Image: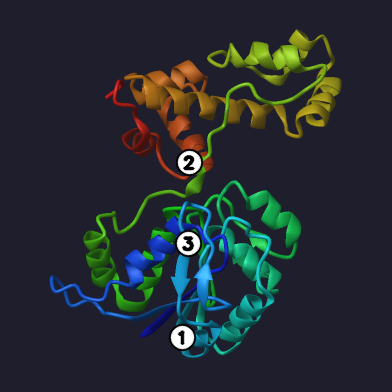
Amino acid sequence: MQTVVVIVQDGAEPFGLGSLCEVWAEPYHPEDDNPVFDFRVCTPRPGRVRGRAGFDLHVEHGLETTADADLVCVSPKYDFLDNDDAVLEAVVSAHERGAIVYAHCSGTFALGQAGLLDGRSCTTHWRFGDRLQRMFPRADVRPDVLYVQDGNMLTGAGAAAGIDASLHLMRQTFGAKVAATTARRIVVPPHRDGGQAQFVRTPMGQTEADTLAPLLEWATAHLDEALPVSRLAREAHMSERTFARRFRDETGTTPLQWLTSQRVALAEEMLENSTLSIEQISQRVGFGNAATLRHHFNLHRGITPQQYRKTFCSAESA
């Protein structure tokens, strides 16, 4: 890999572009012998590229620059459903000739509009995952990860995950030492544990339900207790069969799945804002023991409770 090209369009999102520049555009770093790339930024119509962050860009190169690039990156943009046809043609051409095509954050939508996501695994910012899946139903959207590589196509999640995806590609292409040296230069860890699920806030007690709303509020206040379906049904004054059917109709999930998600969300709050031990938190949220809490927390958030606390613990709790 020698030539790296980034495509920008009107509405360019500056942090997305900046994350790519940090990894691939450094022209000189005498402190190491990492590779230096022929890095270019291009746009459908060279000249002024309008931004939405208080400044515009001036880009000299057109899309013909992508013709010989080893890595073609699609930088995210604010109005991400409005992609230039020439950009879509450029990424298709790059993909067909075997170049690596990398879209970060909302840039993944451009790959979908170019027809490159059909039958492929991909990701985007967690806020846009559902929309991406609806627009491109033949894609395998994975909203909980930081990046996905499927053949010669790489997609990254939102914001800082663009750096994670680039470091992954750096590690795969040049080895762990080069990736670690690059990470040290831009002052980030060479690898982050978990996926973007750990950043998705799940508010307590926000499930909408009609007849079951009082029960859900009651259950949220009693998460530390055993709450089998039989007890919940009694509280709702229903038979277990009627309750189970009504619960799925109104919440879209099962009582066990709902309780588990609420307990994980409450555990998040306690990990962030208390000094309770993992064992104590597991008791307070109704998991019973630390092993069960670790199992469900890792399943839902992709990291352990200890890792989550280390990352998100508030200064007051610390």
Which corner quadrant holds the C terminus?
top left
Q: Tell whether 53 sits left or right of 127.
A: left
Q: Earlier in the sequence, mark 2 or mark 3?
A: 3
Residue in the image at 52% along x and 78% along y: 46
Dot 3: element: loop
Q: Earlier in the sequence, mark 1 or mark 2?
A: 1
Q: Which residue is under mark 2? A: 199
Q: Which residue is under mark 3? A: 56
- Compare residues 203 and 77 and report the one nearer the observer: 77
Dot 1: element: loop
Dot 2: element: helix
Q: Which residue is under mark 1? A: 69
Q: Provide residue 56's location: percent of width, then percent of height.
A: 48, 62
Q: Amino acid at mark 3?
A: Asp
Q: Provide residue 127's location: percent of width, then percent of height.
A: 60, 46
Q: Amino acid at mark 2?
A: Phe
Residue in the image at 69% along x and 26% along y: 207
Q: Provide residue 226's location: percent of width, then percent of height.
A: 59, 15
